[in-house]
């Protein structure tokens, strides 16, 4: 859902009062941010956190450090820790819609759905965050089984940002989750994904949806190939394993009937 952020290039938020730091302390914070980004590029988030945490002991109110920590935590499955950093940013006076979007996402990741929805609905009213807020409202609706509501959100975001790969994927998945999927609906879902194939090349959820679309369209071989890719990139998610097995069974039964 989220693109990686550069930790080095984090800008002090205009809406926040940033305490003046001594030159030596500022240099240490800058070095920590640079070291953290280098560690992330090496695939080592634990070391990135270590560098950032050490710097907070020197500058405990530096918003760049806490925002960087929140983002590292959030992108590495530590939603509770990320949320704690976002709450600390609020206490430091940060009032920024882009950060609020990330905080709302952390709320959802912590299963605090009502609070997350309230925040996304608020942020939907801001031009800079409208699309991302509506996208996340669509995700919440899908999680709650409200496919029609999710479709409304995803269609609105897709109309505004048709090249955005995540919304193409989620719109396709929502189309395929409707109660009765017609061939034309399945074809539209497939077109949403295949025309942006490079963007979804390693996205197992996209491959799963591609397999579902081919299944509706009656091409089991194409569906099976898509499920194989989903298994490969998703490290064998249970939902895909079941689809794969079901497709193999159907192909064997079809062969036996010939």
Image (tube, rainbow, N blue to C red):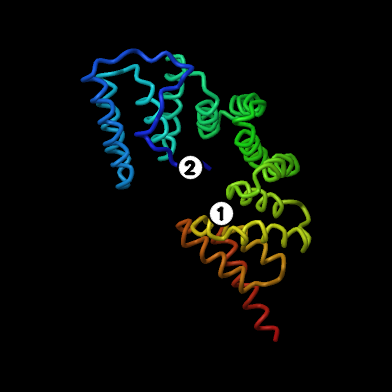
Q: Where is residue 46 in the image (x, y as percent from the top left)?
A: 30, 38
Report the label total. 2
Up-down: is 167 above or below 88? Answer: below
Up-down: is 199 above or below 75? Answer: below
SS at badge 2: loop
Toward the viewer: 173 or 242? 173
Q: Position of residue 10 (x, y in %)?
A: 40, 30
SS at badge 1: helix
Toward the viewer: 8 or 138? 8
110 relative position to 21: left or right: right
The residue under the point 69% across, 57% down is 189
Sequence-first disc among 2 and 1? 2
Instruction: Name the image quarter holding the C terminus.
Output: bottom right
Q: Which mark is residue 205?
A: 1
The residue under the point 60% across, 36% down is 132
Up-down: is 91 above or below 212? Answer: above
Q: Mark 2 points at which residue?
A: 3
Q: Which mark is residue 17?
A: none
Up-down: is 249 above or below 10? Answer: below
Toward the viewer: 43 or 236? 43
Q: Position of residue 35 (x, y in %)?
A: 26, 36
Residue 121 picture quarter? top right
Q: Position of residue 128 (x, y in %)?
A: 60, 30
Residue 200 picture quarter? bottom right
Disc 2 packing (10 Å; few <14; some 14–19; many ≥20): few
Distance, label 2 to label 1, CA atoms, is 17 Å
């Amino acid at each position: 859902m989220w693109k990686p952020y550069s930790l080095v290039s984090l800008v002090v938020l205009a809406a926040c009062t940033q305490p003046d730091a001594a030159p030596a302390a500022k240099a240490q914070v800058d070095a920590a941010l640079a070291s953290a980004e280098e560690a992330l590029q090496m695939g080592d988030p634990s070391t990135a956190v270590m560098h950032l945490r050490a710097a907070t002991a020197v500058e405990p109110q530096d918003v760049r450090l806490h925002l960087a920590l929140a983002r590292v935590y959030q992108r590495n499955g530590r939603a509770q820790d990320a949320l704690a950093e976002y709450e600390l940013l609020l206490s430091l006076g940060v009032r920024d819609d882009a950060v609020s979007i990330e905080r709302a996402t952390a709320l959802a990741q912590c299963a605090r759905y009502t609070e997350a929805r309230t925040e996304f609905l608020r942020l939907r009213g801001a031009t800079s965050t409208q699309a991302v807020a509506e996208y996340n409202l669509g995700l919440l609706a899908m999680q709650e089984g409200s496919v029609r509501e999710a479709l409304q959100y995803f269609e609105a975001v897709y109309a505004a940002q048709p090249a955005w790969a995540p919304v193409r994927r989620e719109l396709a998945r929502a189309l395929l989750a409707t109660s009765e999927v017609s061939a034309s609906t399945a074809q539209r879902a497939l077109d949403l994904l295949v025309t942006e194939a490079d963007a979804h090349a390693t996205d197992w959820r996209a491959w799963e949806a591609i397999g579902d679309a081919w299944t509706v369209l009656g091409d089991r071989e194409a569906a099976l190939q898509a499920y194989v890719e989903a298994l490969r990139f998703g490290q064998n998610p249970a939902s895909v394993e079941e689809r794969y097995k079901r497709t193999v069974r159907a192909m064997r039964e079809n062969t036996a009937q010939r």
